[in-house]
Image (cartoon, rainbow, N blue to C red):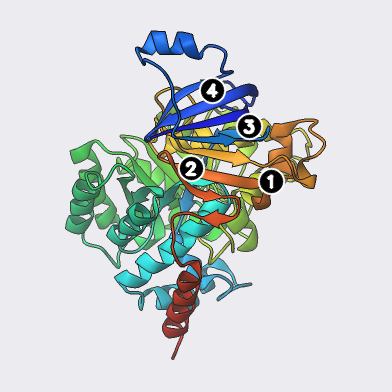
Amino acid sequence: MKIRLYNARIMTMAEGCSLLQGEIWVENDRILYVGDGTDLDAFCKRTGIPGLAADKEIDCEGNVLMPGFKDAHTHSAMVAMRSFADDMPLQEWLNTKIFPLEAKMTEQDNYDLTQLAILEYLTTGVTSVFDMYLSPKDIARACVDMGMRCVLVSGLNKFGPALEVMEERYLTLNRMHPLISYMLGVHAEYTCSRELLEQVSEMVHKYKAPLFTHISETRTETDECLERYGMTPPQFLDSLGLFDYGGGGYHCVHFTEEDMDLFAKKGLHIITNPGSNTKLASGVAPITRFLEKGINVGIGTDGASSNNCLDMFREMFLTTGLAKLKEKDASAVDAEEVLKMATVNGAKAMGLTDCDILAEGKKADIIMIDLHQPNMQPLNNIAKNIVYSGSKQNVKMTMIDGRILYYDGRFLCCDDVEALYAKANEIIARLSAD
């Protein structure tokens, strides 16, 4: 199937946030053509295509087409706990509210709740998620059924799963479906014994695979690791060889200069989660220093239990806004850099090299930003409007793998949205019952 998206402002993100007036042709799951439309005959001659005829044409009415956002750290099924346990310190929140509830969750719960999260991702222009949560096979099923691109990462810890289970998931989920991939990971240093981490390191080396983990999220986590091992969490995990083949960390709030130098030297990725870090009072990550050291920084929402929404617009604003406050410098972390973090950088961290920019041959993961809204006018600087004044109301279309899943406020990937809402309420009522 060929879809023509025309009369658009196109932000390819190939070279910053510059805009091209033109059109995009999509064929099946790939971008066939990006340009101003005047060279289509030359394109057909160059590619050997006898002629272009669209099965569907969409007038973009001057709106922006750009790569979809990459939610590079999330726990999708935690939507069940949205506004369930708020205004509590992280460790108390985890140990008295979240962990006990999660112990009751079934695989079907995880599937149903992930589908609810996907609806929310679509409304905020997210076309790929980096998901660490319970029963990843059920997350994968939900994503395939709804059409969401998903990179799964293991959250292995002292409570499970067994190492053999993580290895089996690594081998099977990476072959499951084109929308699904899987990376090795652990929940965090503080939820794993040294012996377990050493065993994970053996697996990292066996498959020459990157590893991702929550790391240096709180001051307490960092101080306790220093007390246990005489090293910060990044330095300790690296000493075990866990980062020998790349990977990175989520949150990275309490990084020392040495931690940053380690990440820069090894080419590791940092995923910042400013909404969750703010609400849990974990601190403000030193984004400016990360960028100065050349570290690749992506953006994630974290789970809806700690955020409490899966909104990339809010995360983008907080990424730059908190950096400006931390540095006491209004020029810190430019909005265009933030758009790069939310798209290109996130794709790089997730290993989605075909989903980073809009270009011929890339995956057709495309969103349309509606400029015909008061918060986007006047058009002084469209890229900065998206970061500083944009919101979910501006997402007019979300396309993943060439399929339009959300358009003009309607979900095209779910027959009964209200049934999903009802199911989520049933699940949390059961899980929270004494």
| Contact check, label 2 and label 4, Cβ < 8 Å | no
Q: If the image is split into quadrants, where does the N terminus sit?
A: top left
x%, y% of residue 205? 22, 39
On the image, the x and y values in percent for residue 129 come to: 44, 48
In this rendering, the label closer to the viewer, 2 or 4: 2
Q: Is residue 27 left or right of residue 173?
A: right
197, above or below 372, in the image: below
Q: Which one is closest to the eye, mark 2 or mark 1? A: 2
User: Of residues 106 and 45, which is closer to you in this image?
Assistant: 45
Q: Nearer the viewer, mark 3 or mark 2?
A: 2
The answer to which of marks 2 and 1 sits earlier in the sequence is: 1
- In this figure, which residue is indicated by the disc labeled 3? 337
Q: Amino acid at mark 2?
A: Met
Query: Dot 2: what SS?
Result: strand
CA distance separating discs 3 and 2: 23 Å
* Numbered circle sitting on residue 317: 1
